[in-house]
Each structure stands twice: as structure tokens, then as C-alpha cells.
Amino acid sequence: MNGVAEAESHHQARLQWQCRRGMLELDLLLRGFLAKGYANLSAAEKLSFDRLLQIPDPQLLEYLMGREQPEDKELIDVVARVRAVFTD
């Protein structure tokens, strides 16, 4: 495996781990998005998704369920992309 492929594999494994959450709902949403929609994100959106994964579970659930909205525009866009995978 070359260095780029190895780095990508490590990054994917890290994302899989970060998408495993303490709440089953979040686990299903995030891991489902990783499988179905993550590859379609731009580089900037992927960075925003990484930031989204740093948000505590209760707040993240509020965003993904549409009950609250982040203040950060980039996070709003990524939340919409995650939600769209499950509503389209």
C-alpha cells in the first residue's frame, strides 16, 4: 500500500470510529451517512464534517433531528447534507 492509500485508509478508520456514538440514533445516522454520502462531500465539507463530529452527542442529535441549528454556516450545510441522505 502506498503512502496516500495508507493515509486514506487510516482517515476512513478514524471516521468510522468517530461516527460510533453513545446514542444509537447518532450512531445509525452518522455511520449511514459515512457509507452513503460522505464520498460526495467537497474537501471543505469533509473538514466541516470532521468539526461536526467534535460536537457533544446531545447537541449533535438536536442538529441532526432538525430541532436546533448550528450558528456556523458550514456546519449548517453539512448537517443538511447528512439529513438529506435520510430524507431523499
Image (cartoon, grey):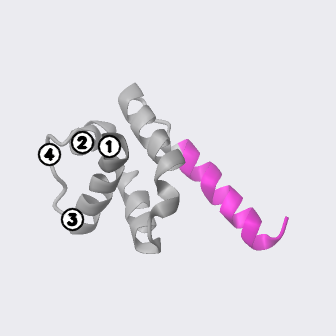
Q: Earlier in the sequence, mark 2 or mark 3?
A: 2
Disc 4 and disc 2: Cα gap in Å?
8 Å
Instruction: Tell whether 6 sits left or right of 53.
Output: right
Q: Is residue 13 magenta?
A: yes
Residue lying at the far right of the rendered structure = 1
Residue closest to the eye, 85 or 16: 85
- Which residue is disc 2 drawn over? 59
Kindly indicate whether the residue at mark 1 contacts the one at mark 2 (C-beta within 8 angstroms). yes
Residue type for callout 3 = Asp
- Which residue is disc 4 drawn over? 68
Disc 2 and disc 3: Cα gap in Å?
14 Å
Disc 3 and disc 4: Cα gap in Å?
12 Å
Tag 3's secondary structure?
loop
Image point 35% across, 55% down: which residue? 52
Q: Earlier in the sequence, mark 4 or mark 2?
A: 2
Residue 26 found in image quarter: top left
Q: Which mark is residue 72?
A: 3
Disc 1 and disc 3: Cα gap in Å?
16 Å
- Which residue is disc 1 drawn over? 56
Q: Earlier in the sequence, mark 4 or mark 1?
A: 1
Residue type for callout 1 = Pro
Callout in the foreground (1, 3) = 3
